[in-house]
Image (cartoon, rainbow, N blue to C red):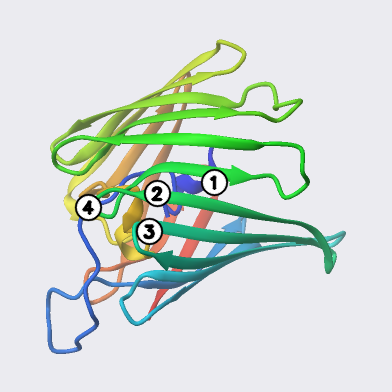
C-alpha cells in the first residue's frame, strides 16, 4: 500500500480548495501541516517536514527515515515562476549525496499541474506525467511515460479516478506489465479532511477529498482508519488497522 495514503495524500489523494493567508481571527483559515511522524507498532519510522512561503505555498519539504542500520534523507525545494513550478530534489543515504534531480511542472490557469517532466539527475532519461481534472478541479486522470532504459516492472502507466460527492471513491491503476489494480475508498461523511493537499501546500495537484477515508480496499486487502482531533477539529492522529499511526502537527 502506498505510503501517501497516510498523508492522504499528504500525496496520492486529492485536493479541495485553495490556500489563504494565515489570520488568527479568521475561522475559515486553512490549517497548514508543519510535521508528521509515522510510527509502526510504536516505533518511529519516518518524519515529514513542510515549510511554506508568504503565500502559504509549499516552499520546502523533507522526508527522513532512520533505523538501526542506516538513514535516508530526501529534500525538495519549490520555486514558482509564472505558470511553472520547478522542484529541486536531493537524495541522501547515510549523509552521502545519492542523486539530485529536477522536476519541471506546467500549471494551468487554475494553478493545477497538467504536465510534470522529471529528470533522473543521472543522465539516463526522464519521465513525463500528464494530469487531467474535471470541471470542479478534481484530478481524474494520471498518464505516465518515461525514457529510462530499464523502467521498473510494475511502474504505473495510468490512473483513472472516479469522484463522487467531492470524494475519490475508485482508482483504476494500470501498470507497464499490463496488470490492473482497483482501489476503493469509503469515507466518514461527518469528518472534514484537514490532512490533504490543501493542508500541505500542494494545491497544484487539484482539489482534495472533502472527507476523511474510513476504509481503503485494494484487491483482497483492506485498511481501516480512525482519527483523533484537536479542539479546532483538525486531525492530530491517524490510526490504522495495520498498527500504524501518524502524529500530525500544524503551524
Residue 190 location in percent, x, y? 15, 51
> Which mark is first along the chain, 3 or 1?
1
Where is 42 relative to 29, above or below? above
In the rendered image, which residue does mark 4 sit on? 110
In the rendered image, which residue does mark 2 sit on? 106
**Element assignment for label 2:** strand
Where is 207 relative to 249, above or below? above
> Which mark is first along the chain, 2 or 1?
1
Residue 202, disc: 3
Mark 4–mark 2 distance (CA, rounded to whole Å): 11 Å
Q: Residue at x 28, y 55 (%)?
A: 111
* Relative depth, front residue between 227 and 210: 210
| 160 left or right, relative to 77 | left
Q: Residue at x 50, y 56 (%)?
A: 245
> Which mark is first along the chain, 1 or 4?
1
| 174 left or right, relative to 99 | left
Q: Residue at x 70, y 27 (%)?
A: 152
Q: Nearer the viewer, mark 4 or mark 3?
A: 4
Mark 1 surroundings within 10 Å by alpha-carbon count, few (fewer than 14), some (14 through 19), many (20 or more):
few
Q: Determine the image quadrant of residue 69.
A: bottom right
Residue 3, disc: 1
Q: Nearer the viewer, mark 4 or mark 2?
A: 2
**Element assignment for label 4:** loop
Mark 1–mark 3 distance (CA, rounded to whole Å): 17 Å
Mark 2 surroundings within 10 Å by alpha-carbon count, few (fewer than 14), some (14 through 19), many (20 or more):
some
Q: Nearer the viewer, mark 2 or mark 3?
A: 2
Residue 52 location in percent, x, y? 41, 76
Amino acid at each position: 500500500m502506498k505510503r501517501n495514503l497516510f498523508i492522504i495524500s499528504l500525496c496520492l489523494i486529492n485536493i479541495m480548495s485553495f490556500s489563504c493567508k494565515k489570520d488568527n481571527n479568521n475561522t475559515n483559515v486553512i490549517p497548514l501541516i508543519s510535521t508528521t511522524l509515522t510510527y509502526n507498532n510504536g516505533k518511529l519510522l519516518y518524519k515529514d517536514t513542510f515549510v511554506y512561503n508568504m503565500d502559504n505555498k509549499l516552499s520546502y519539504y523533507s522526508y527522513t527515515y532512520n533505523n538501526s542500520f542506516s538513514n535516508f534523507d530526501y529534500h525538495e525545494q519549490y520555486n514558482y515562476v509564472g505558470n511553472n513550478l520547478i522542484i529541486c530534489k536531493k537524495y541522501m543515504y547515510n549523509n552521502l549525496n545519492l542523486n539530485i534531480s529536477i522536476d519541471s511542472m506546467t500549471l494551468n490557469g487554475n494553478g493545477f499541474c497538467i504536465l510534470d517532466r522529471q529528470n533522473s539527475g543521472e543522465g539516463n532519461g526522464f519521465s513525463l506525467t500528464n494530469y487531467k481534472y474535471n470541471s470542479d478541479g478534481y484530478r481524474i486522470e494520471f498518464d505516465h511515460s518515461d525514457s529510462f532504459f530499464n523502467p521498473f516492472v510494475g511502474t504505473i502507466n495510468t490512473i483513472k479516478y472516479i469522484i463522487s460527492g467531492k470524494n475519490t471513491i475508485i482508482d483504476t491503476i494500470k501498470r507497464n506489465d499490463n496488470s490492473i489494480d482497483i482501489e476503493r475508498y469509503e469515507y466518514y461523511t461527518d469528518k472534514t479532511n484537514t490532512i490533504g493537499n490543501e493542508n500541505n501546500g500542494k494545491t497544484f495537484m487539484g482539489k482534495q477529498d472533502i472527507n476523511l477515508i474510513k476504509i481503503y480496499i485494494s484487491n483482497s486487502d483492506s485498511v481501516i482508519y480512525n482519527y483523533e482531533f484537536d479542539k479546532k477539529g483538525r486531525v492530530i492522529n491517524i490510526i490504522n488497522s495495520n498498527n500504524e499511526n501518524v502524529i500530525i502537527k500544524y503551524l
